[in-house]
Amino acid sequence: MSSPEQRLNSVLQRIATATQNAGCRDRVRLLAVSKTQSDTAIRALAAAGQRAFGENYVQEASAKHDALRDLALEWHLIGHLQSNKAREAATRFDWVQSVDRDSVIAALARHRSDTQAPLNVLIQVNIDGERSKSGCLPEQIAALAARIACQSRLCLRGLMAIPDPEHDAQQRAISFSRMQQAYCQLRDSYPRVDTLSMGMSGDFEQAIAHGANLVRIGTALFGPRE
Ligand SMILES: *Cc1c(COP(=O)(O)O)cnc(C)c1O
């Protein structure tokens, strides 16, 4: 078995190569997706130099946040956010990537403490129109962005998407490039927008080729989840 440090370096190397192949734009950030992983596994990756971690569930993240407070990590919520968890999410996380409706925007803004920096948010887009999935429709992005921009406790940083896992590489390319277009449009209107979050263990090189600059990777860093 490879060590956490070896796995991290291998992923970072693949990101660097993909970034170079895409024609050296901005830096691509790595978010380590630590859902279901133990505090020990997260500590090992942090010791190897990784700072940003992504979690899907508010409760699970809060426990890790407490246990790993000494490390001063950056926490991202990447799972669907229920309204009744918005208060906890607003104070626990540095980023919420799964903002997809007005009620969540209002709740996060209301509960983000004045003593904290504004909460960084991404609008999650349901790019393949999957019925059961969270995320707004592409045509709703502009209205949600305008809502976020009115909130001084929130900072709109960009877009996030999870393509339909059933899709093949060709179908995914279409989804990724639609996201890239939507992202460029949003960036023209909002100067603080600088983040396009797409790409996971199985497709992050392809996502980078389509302009992703934050990739969310679990399995390739931690090994398969239980
Ligand atoms: C679990 C998860 C990931 C990471 O998936 P891997 O295939 O393990 O890299 C990325 N993004 C989201 C939203 C996830 O839920």
Image (cartoon, rainbow, N blue to C red):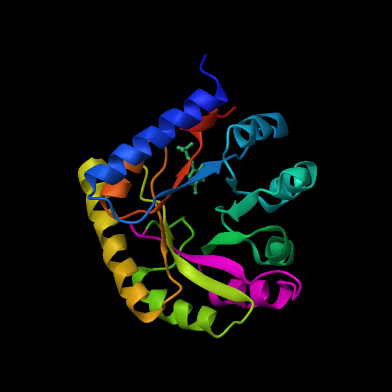
Residue 189 seen anywhere in this rendered image of the structure: yes
Residue 193 percent coordinates (x, y):
43, 70
Residue 203 percent coordinates (x, y):
34, 40
Nearer the observer, 46 or 196: 46
**Residue 197 quadrant:** bottom left
With 177 as the anchor, is 149 left or right in this view? right
Residue 203 seen anywhere in this rendered image of the structure: no
**Residue 118 quadrant:** bottom right
Residue 127 percent coordinates (x, y):
35, 59
Nearer the observer, 109 or 82: 109
Q: Residue furthest bottom?
A: 150
**Residue 126 quadrant:** bottom left
Residue 50 percent coordinates (x, y):
57, 40
Up-down relation of residue 37 to residue 88 (above or below): above
Residue visible at 55% across and 29% down in the picture: 222
Up-down relation of residue 131 to residue 68 (above or below): below
Instruction: Give the magenta-colored segment's residue range.
Output: 100-129
Can residue 207 be found in the magenta stretch? no
Residue visible at 31% across and 48% down in the picture: 208
Q: Residue furthest top?
A: 1
With 202 as the anchor, is 168 left or right in this view? left
Can residue 115 be found in the magenta stretch? yes
Residue visible at 66% across and 48% down in the picture: 73
With 32 as the anchor, is 210 left or right in this view? left
Q: Residue furthest left?
A: 170
Up-down relation of residue 198 to residue 15 (above or below): below
Up-down relation of residue 55 to residue 177 (above or below): above
Image quadrant holding the C terminus, namely: top right
